[in-house]
Amino acid sequence: MKRETVGILACPACRGSNSLDVFHEQDGEVERGRLICDACGVAIPVLHGFPLFTEARLNEGLASEADLEALSTRLFGDLAAYDAYRRQKDERGLWESYAAFQPFNESSRAAAPLLPAIQAHLKPGDIILDTWGRTGWSGEWLAGLFPDCRVISLWEGDSSVLGYRGFRYWLNAGRRAPNLDILFTPPNRPLPFASETFGAVYALDCLHRYELSFGSECLRVARPDAALLFAHLHLTNAEPDPWFERGCRQVHGRDYRVWLDTALKNDSRRSWVLAETDLFNARPGDILADTPETPHYNGDIFIAQADRSPMIVKSMPKSPPGSYFLVTPLLRLDFGRNAVMVDGALHDSDIGRLLDRHPVYRQRLPNGLRSMSNSDWLGVCLAVTGRTAGEIRASMGEASSLDDLIDDEILLPVQISAKALELQRFHGNQLPLFQGAALWDDLMSRLRNAEAPAIVLPDGSEVSGQDVARTVSALSEVMSAAIADFDQTRINLEASDEPLGLLVLLGAVSAGIDVVLGDTAADGLLVHKGAGGQKNDAVQLYGSADCLAARLAEKLESGNLTMCSSPGGLITLRGCSPLPAFLFIEAAASLRHALRPDLSGISDFCEMNELLHCLAGLFRSEPLIFAGADR
C-alpha cells in the first residue's frame, strides 16, 4: 500500500480518518502495518501491502506487530505451499473458466467504447476505483489503460480463484502495476473511502450482486464530475435463449432509468442505460443511445459529464508497442490439421457450457476450422511467451497476419504489467510451472522417469521417455563433435520426417547449435536420411559407417552421458527469421492443454505446426505417433 492511499481512506463504521503505523516498508510500499481509526479506534491490518478491512480488530492492542505476524502466517501461508498448489493445478490441467475468460468476456469488453469518455474526465494523479477485483484482472487492466492515474482495486476477502494467498503470490507490493493498490473489504458494507474521492468508478458485476445501497455508495465516493460505469447488469427485459439461470437481482432497464433520474436529479451529469450487446458490437462512428427498453437481458449503466449531442464511439489503438497479447484459451489448437476451432469438449466441456451462456461472444469466434499459417503460429508463440506488441510486429514483419489474429479473437491486445500477463496465463492454463532453463530440466526429468512410450516409430515400435531423454543427451555431444569435424557452426536438417531427426534437432539446440529446417540451400552441416547417396559437406542419419545413428549407438553404448543443457541455439523455419529454440519449447509447454488429444500423423516438423505438435507432445503423457505408425 502506498502512503498516499491513507489520505483517501475512511472508517466504514464512523467515516473517521485513519492514522498509519508502519512496521515494515520497502521501495515506498507499506508492506506491514496497521491503520487506526482516529475516531473509534478500530485497527485495520496491512499485510503484504494489502489493507485488510475484512480482518478488522477492535483496538490497536489486538494488532501488535507480533499479532500481525501470526495473522500473516495464518491467512497468507508461505510461497512454497502456493507453488505446490500451482504444481497440482498444472499437472491436472485445472482451471476456473470465468477467470480465464474475463479479459475476452463481452461483459468486460463492453467498456471499450466508453473508455474515451472516461479518459476525458481524468487528469494525471486522479484516482480510479475498481470495485470487483475478483481475479486480479480488472485493476491491472485499468492501471495499464490509465498509467498517469492511480487505481484502487477491491475484493471481498479470502475467497474465489485467488484468495489472500493468490493475491500475495501474484500481486503483492512490488509485483503489481506501480500505480495500483489492492484492498480487501467485506461485501455489502460501506466503502472505506472519504466522500468525493475518485475521478472514475468502474463497477463490473456488482450493482446486481450487492445491496441496493451499493450504487449510492459509489456515487458518494465519486467526485461530482466523475464518470461511473456499472458494467454487466442482469436485466428482466428478456431471458437468455437457450435459457440458463442467471441469479442475482434482476431489474428491468426502465426501473434503473427511474433510479438514475431520482439519484441524479440535482446532478449536472447525464446517464445512460445501455444494452451490453450494443456496446460489445459498437464500432467507431456508432451512436450510443439510452435504451432502457433494450430487448437484451444484460445491460450497463454509464454516468458522465456530457453535452446534449449524441455520444459517438471513437476508435482506440489496437496494440500500442508496449502492450501484450493474450492467447485465447477458448479454442482447440489442432496442429495436425494446421488449424484452430471452437471445440465445446475442450477443458472437460467447460468451453461448451461457457459459450452456451455467451452466444454474443460465440458469434465473434471462427466458424468451423480456421486455418493457420506459419506466420499465425509464430504470432501465437510470441504472444503466449510474453513478447510485447512491438517485439511481435518486428519479428513477424510488416506483412504479418497479426491484425487477422486479433480480428478472429485468437489474440487479444492488452495494456497490463508483465506480472498481470503471467497471472492471466495462469488463469488460462498457459503458464508452465517452471520458467527458463528449469522448464527444460523439468521436461528432461519427466522423460527420464517415464517408462511409458513417448514416441511411436513408423514401423509401430515404441521408444520410452527414458530412451528419448538418453538419446537427446547423447546427441547433444554427438552433434557438437559432428559440426567440429566439418568445421561448421550450424546444421541444416533435411531429414524432417524422421523421428531421429526430431531428436537430432533437440540435441543440437541443447548443445547451443543453430538449426535450419527445410532449406537445403542454407549454409551449415547438411543432415539427411542417406537415400540418394553421399553428399558433400553432409552427414547421414543412417546407412554409413560414420552416420549419426552409428555415432549415437557408440555414444549410448559407452554409457558416458552428461545431462544436456537448456537449449541455447536458434531455429530457422521456412519463411521465418531465426528464433531462439527455447521460444518454441516454452510456447509448446504453454499451449499443451489446448492440444487436440490425438498426437498422430507427424510427418514434417519443418513446418511450424508440426514442430509445435512434437514439442507440445513431449510435455504430455500420450506418445507422439509418426506417420505410418500402426497404433
Image (tube, rainbow, N blue to C red):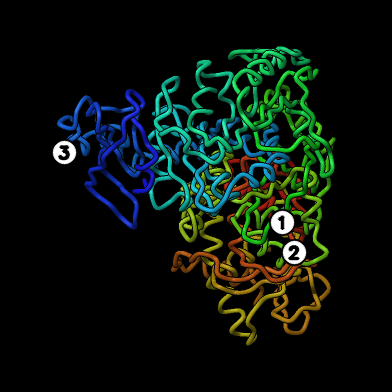
- Residue type highlighted by circle 3: Ala
**Disc 3: which residue:** 66
Q: Earlier in the sequence, mark 1 or mark 2?
A: 1
Q: CA distance from mark 1 to mark 2?
A: 7 Å
Q: Secondary structure at mark 2?
A: helix
The answer to whether residue 329 is seen in the rendering is yes
Q: Residue at x 73, y 84 (%)?
A: 537
Q: Are marks 1 and 2 in contact (CB under 8 Å)?
A: yes
Residue 238 appears at what percent x and percent y?
76, 13
Task: Give the residue number, with chain letter if any, for mark 1.
Answer: 379
Residue 543 visible at all:
no
Tag of residue 440: none
Rendered image: mark on residue 396? 2
Q: Residue at x 46, y 53 (%)?
A: 178
Frontmost residue, 455 versus 38:
38
What amino acid does circle 1 point to?
Gly
- Quadrant where the image shows the C terminus: top right
- Mark 3 surroundings within 10 Å by alpha-carbon count, few (fewer than 14), some (14 through 19), many (20 or more): few
Q: Secondary structure at mark 3?
A: helix
